[in-house]
Image (cartoon, rainbow, N blue to C red):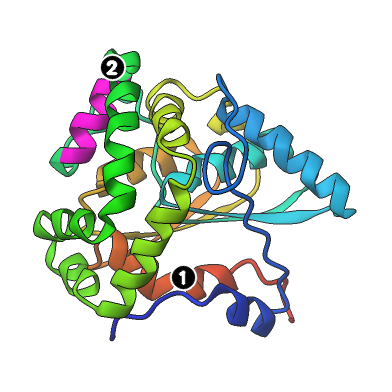
């Protein structure tokens, strides 16, 4: 299947879904919030839904957004109607969590777990470079990636989209990304056992950013989950190629 940039707005229209993608604190134009937690994000989403008059809604988490979607499902159980995750990060307090993970991610998340202040300082220093040189960052990611990810990261359209995404995420500098390391690396402040809805998960068996073993551990801790394993797919290739299918799973039956 050729590399394709996910097109959430057309897919949302096709499936009669209204898509809302708020930036987490410190990313894009969203204000930095020192000390924030995953559970606090659920509070933010609940408040946003109130402002928009949304009583019920589905949540969709991609990569590091997976834990945030699960936090909403746990903390806003009476309002969340469906949950779908695409290449989601699992809980990192599991002893084997970082085994098989790409070196840069393994070191960054490990440092965040053991020396969080140092990890945040290094991230704040690295963020301006990444914003100025997104294509060089992509070169480094591509060099260490599995074959499927190398293929999609070589596509000029995908590189342009991902480069722009990095720049937008780091618009305010590295404070948001630096705190994100702490939020993800430490024990999450909600219980996976409180996610009572069925959780649909898509994951690539060649993923080295979020190793399959970590997703198996995540799925085993959820009361009700279904994982669709994609042979040969990496992290970026799965997201770029299977975004529409995962999004479609949130569409109410018969629409």
Q: Is residue 107 magenta?
A: yes
In the figure, 115 relative to 235: above or below?
above
Question: Which span of residues is magenta-colored?
Answer: 104-112
Q: Main secondary structure of the magenta part?
A: helix
Element carrying mark 2: helix
* Pointer 1 or 2: first along the chain: 2
The reply to whether residue 64 is in sight is yes
Image position, residue 144 (x, y; %): 10, 54
Question: Which residue matches tag 1?
Answer: 243
Residue placed furthest toward the left? 143
Spatial CA span between label 1 and label 2: 35 Å
Element carrying mark 1: helix
Q: Is residue 97 left or right of residue 12?
A: left
Question: Which residue matches tag 2?
Answer: 118
Residue placed furthest toward the right? 53
Instruction: Check the picture and name the quadrant holding the N terminus.
Output: bottom left
């Amino acid at each position: 299947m050729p590399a394709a940039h996910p097109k959430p707005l057309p897919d949302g229209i096709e499936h009669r879904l209204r898509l809302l993608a708020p930036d987490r604190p410190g990313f894009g134009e969203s204000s930095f919030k020192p000390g924030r937690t995953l559970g606090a994000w659920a509070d933010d989403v609940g408040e946003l839904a109130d402002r928009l008059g949304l009583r019920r809604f589905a949540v969709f988490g991609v990569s590091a957004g997976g834990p945030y979607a699960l936090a909403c499902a746990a903390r806003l159980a009476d309002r969340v109607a469906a949950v779908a995750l695409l290449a989601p990060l699992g809980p990192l307090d599991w002893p084997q969590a970082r085994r098989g993970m790409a070196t840069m991610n393994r070191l960054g998340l490990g440092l965040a777990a053991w020396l969080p202040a140092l990890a945040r300082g290094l991230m704040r220093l690295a963020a301006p470079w990444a914003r100025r040189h997104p294509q060089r960052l992509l070169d480094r990611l591509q060099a260490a990636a599995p074959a499927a990810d190398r293929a999609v990261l070589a596509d000029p359209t995908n590189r342009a989209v991902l480069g722009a995404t990095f720049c937008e995420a780091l618009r305010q500098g590295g404070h948001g990304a630096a705190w994100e390391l702490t939020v993800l690396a430490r024990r999450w402040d909600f219980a996976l056992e409180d996610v009572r809805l069925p959780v649909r998960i898509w994951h690539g068996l060649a993923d080295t950013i979020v190793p399959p073993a970590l997703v198996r551990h995540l799925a085993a801790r959820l009361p009700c989950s279904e994982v669709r394993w994609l042979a040969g797919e990496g992290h970026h290739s799965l997201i770029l190629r299977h975004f529409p299918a995962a999004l479609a799973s949130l569409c109410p039956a018969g629409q």
